[in-house]
Image (cartoon, helix red, strand yellow):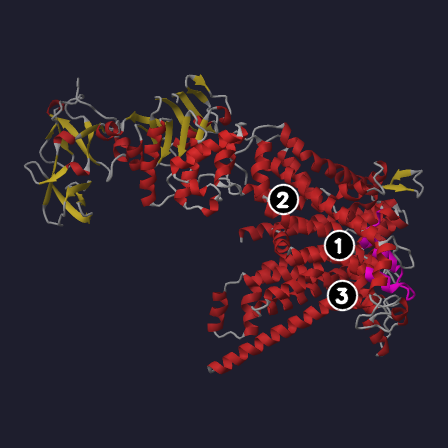
Amino acid sequence: MDAATTRRRRLRGAAWAHAVLAIGVLIFFLPIWITLVGSTHDTATIGRGDVPLLPGGEAIANYTAAWNAGGGRYRSAPAGLMLGNSLLMAVLIAGGKIAISLISAYAVVFFRFPGRMLAFWTIFLTLMLPVEVRIIPTFQVMVDLSLVNTMAGLTIPLIASATATLLFRQFFLTIPDEYVEAAKIDGAGPLRFFRDVVLPLSVTNIAALFVILFIYGWNQYLWPLLIVNDRGLETIVVGLAKMIGSGDTQNEWNVIMATAVLALVPPVFVVVAMQRWFVKGLTETEK
Amino acid sequence: MATLTLTGVKKAFGATQVLHGVDLAVADGEMVVIVGASGCGKSTLLRIVAGLETPSEGQVRIDGRDVTPLEPADRDIAMVFQNYALYPHMTVFDNMAYGLKIRGLPKPEIRRRVEEGAALLGIQELLARKPRQLSGGQRQRVAMGRAIVREPKLFLFDEPLSNLDAKLRVQMRAEIRRLQKRLGVTSLFVTHDQVEAMTLGDRLVVMHQGHAVQVASPMEIWSRPANTYVAGFIGSPAMNFLPAVLVDGGGAARLAGGGAPIRFVDGPRAGGEGRAVTLGIRPEHLEVGGPDALPVVVDLVEPLGSESVLHGRLADDTALVARLPGAAALTEGMRLAIAPEALHVFDAATGARIDPAGG
Amino acid sequence: MIKRVIFKGQLLPLLLLAPQLAVTAVFFLWPAGQAIYQSLLQEDPFGLRREFVGTENFDAVLNDPLWLNALGNTAVFSVSVAALALGVALLLAVQADKAIRGANLYKTMLIWPYAVAPAVAAVLWLFLFHPSIGLIGRALNAAGVAWDYKLNGGQAMLLVIVASAWKQVSYNFIFFLAGLQSIPRSVLEAAAIDGARPFRRFWTVVFPLLSPTSFFLLVVNLVYAFFDTFGVIHALTGGGPGNATETLIYKVYVDGVQNLNLGASAAQSVILMVLVVGLTMVQFRFVERRVHY
């Protein structure tokens, strides 16, 4: 086999790889493309079933309608409001999870106290109890605490996080003992050490985790579906699904498609913009 | 400026007794080096002085005040760590200033102290950098600086030079000693390196298995080691040990390998005829030839330029190392003589030094 | 592994743990305990009477043809989603690993669906497969295939599988690519010198080295298909047509929230709990092994 053949074979291999990847990327983009295009046409065009492949001229009208008024046969809340709710919910869940996991992990790693392992395993147990397996009793607790239809109810029950606690614990264990000793000699107490040393050292981990948890919060479905029926608190993911109804042909599909685009832009933007943190967060949390 | 006194300091981790009651008095401005092999308890002792460990028994006094129950921060000490323990996210300035900030010193005072300290160590240009942008030697200086700006009563050094390469280590060693003398701060320095210990300390504490086996000046320890452990630990190459018995009423010793008795020039040892002893002779106190010289089979010569180190065996197979000036050749039938005035005598069973009776 | 150097104090760490423990106790442990308790009770829909019935609820659930149907659906659905998502991701990752130039670009282009909510993914695929307004749905009908996922259970299942797998490919892709990129070039070169052709090289060298990653991903994908796809099914098919896409999770929701059959819902919850505990244990046993690897 001479050099030219090897070269040709290698080129053919690369071309093949690029072709497969291009097709993959196209399939990935197809639903998005159709949705984007659909969101720029009027109701009748889509309702007729003439699926357009190129953008139309109704973009501004559709997005304005979605943003300000909502739509669909089930009149959704305005997308602007729902986006605001989703954003607040996602930030509160991500922030809350990070905050309480940081301090829990700090307590478990940097102190010895009775019940330490019990506390650790209790937190670990939450991994095994997703909302889905305790729907009804959890809902009852929410009713008893008057948390139904509140932002607090939407977020607080979701901020326990075994994954984040485990991640921070793992990271804290790698902080050299000498830092703690140096801090003791410098006269820093545990809270000061947390603020001045541990927190600054955790910034990368916090950023990575924030991306993952923001997506987690934004994409919540069952929980808001259960405890929110006040349209003022509707989140965009649930609102969008409700707009579809049972999928009848007659619907304001253009507005729904515009809402779908609005629903996926923020989390997609976070992932793409913070790709490095995202990949790190993903691979670290699964260790 | 302060004195440090340890009385009966013991430490056990679970069932393991790490320190068996250490007593030590460090004078004001003195630099005492704690030296020993790894696991001898030297680091634990230092950490007890720092307050990072609590002793099981005994007391630590700084300037006469019992600090045993106090937190490290309340002892007015500063410590230089083996890996420097510089906070990686803070600049050099912030690292040096951190302890002062926590103590609530006014900002201008902090700035003054840090700048003075930096000038003393020649690291003024590095103040804005982060630790990862520094070389090993520079980090070492910053770690020193962090201790200096605190103006503590006591400096504690936990093997601060062991992460440096050999050349830098020699340089920093001298620098630390100069600085310590200039500042006159009472210091405790832990190392496993006997050369470091000899060059740095006003006095040495040789630790072995949780005991302080000898506390004395470097020269005293070198010339009058308290037992075979100290004798073998201090000095390089290590002292030769030759089994022997006392003869001539304790006035001389006969080597187990035979040969003429070696007469003690400083007086007879107690115990009389037949007492089993270990004779110690440093490699540099062996010389070629002489009337009572011992036959040695040399199997290795290490030329070091100004001197040569010979490895060989006596007739009874006891290993012997000699340090001779200049170049030495591997020659058949070489004979080495012991300089009697440099002879050390130890008890064969306990290893304790035996001095001339009544002397 | 524990730290040698620690701070003193007992109260402070408990205070630091308090928020997390409180949330865990109130919203996790107590409801889970309630679920177990309720699974042993029979209550009328108005909550007026309740009586202890032992394992009756469990017997009822395990003999309920609808529950068994949901169990079968779940098995088909989970295995298909995992197989599809893993297969496509592996194919793409292998190609991206080969195309060294642009691997990162492809990564960016392929990872974003991870961010799309399952329910939104369902809506996007509905736009494609809707029988009268969807591009592919209409094309299929025009080609003579009677496509309507709202009437045909098999088609409905296919659609929820595709929509669910689509989203998960991103995740698998990231891990497969990382796994492939961590295989030392020298190993591949050695195989090449040994004369193994690319295809053979993949199956005899690359794939075995990827197997820890693959097994880990398999567990993660099954967990995903079990629990995180509720939104896809709820938004797209509502479990229909005729319970054809009703999974175990979906049935718990329907029985508890819509039919208010608390005893049955609780019994199903408890069965699911046992399942999650099992899956989590498998996952962690494996993680442990991976650590020592």
Check residue C228 in the rendering and tell me which mark sits there, or answer none. 1
Q: Chain of mark 2?
A: A
What's the magenta region? A233-258
**Labels 3 and 1 touching (C-beta < 8 A):** no
State left or right for residue A194 relative to residue B70: right
- Establish whether labels 2 and 1 are both on one chain: no
Q: How many marks?
A: 3
Residue C35 visible? The answer is: no
Check residue A32 in the rendering and tell me which mark sits there, or answer none. 3
Whichever of callouts 2 and 3 sits on the residue coming sooner in the sequence is 3
Q: Cα distance, mark 2 to mark 3?
A: 36 Å
| Residue A253 belongs to magenta span | yes
Residue A75 visible? The answer is: yes
User: Based on the displayed image, in which of its 4 quarters is residue C142 positioned?
Assistant: bottom right
User: Based on the displayed image, in which of its 4 quarters is residue B346 positioned?
Assistant: top left
Q: Chain of mark 3?
A: A
**Labels 2 and 1 touching (C-beta < 8 A):** no
In the image, B330 versus B169, the foreground residue is B169
Q: Amino acid at mark 2?
A: Leu
Q: Amino acid at mark 1?
A: Asp
In the image, A2 versus C192, the foreground residue is A2
| Residue B168 belongs to magenta span | no
State left or right for residue C244 relative to residue C92: right
Label 2: which residue? A166
Q: Amino acid at mark 3?
A: Ile
Q: Secondary structure at mark 2?
A: helix
- Establish whether labels 2 and 3 are both on one chain: yes
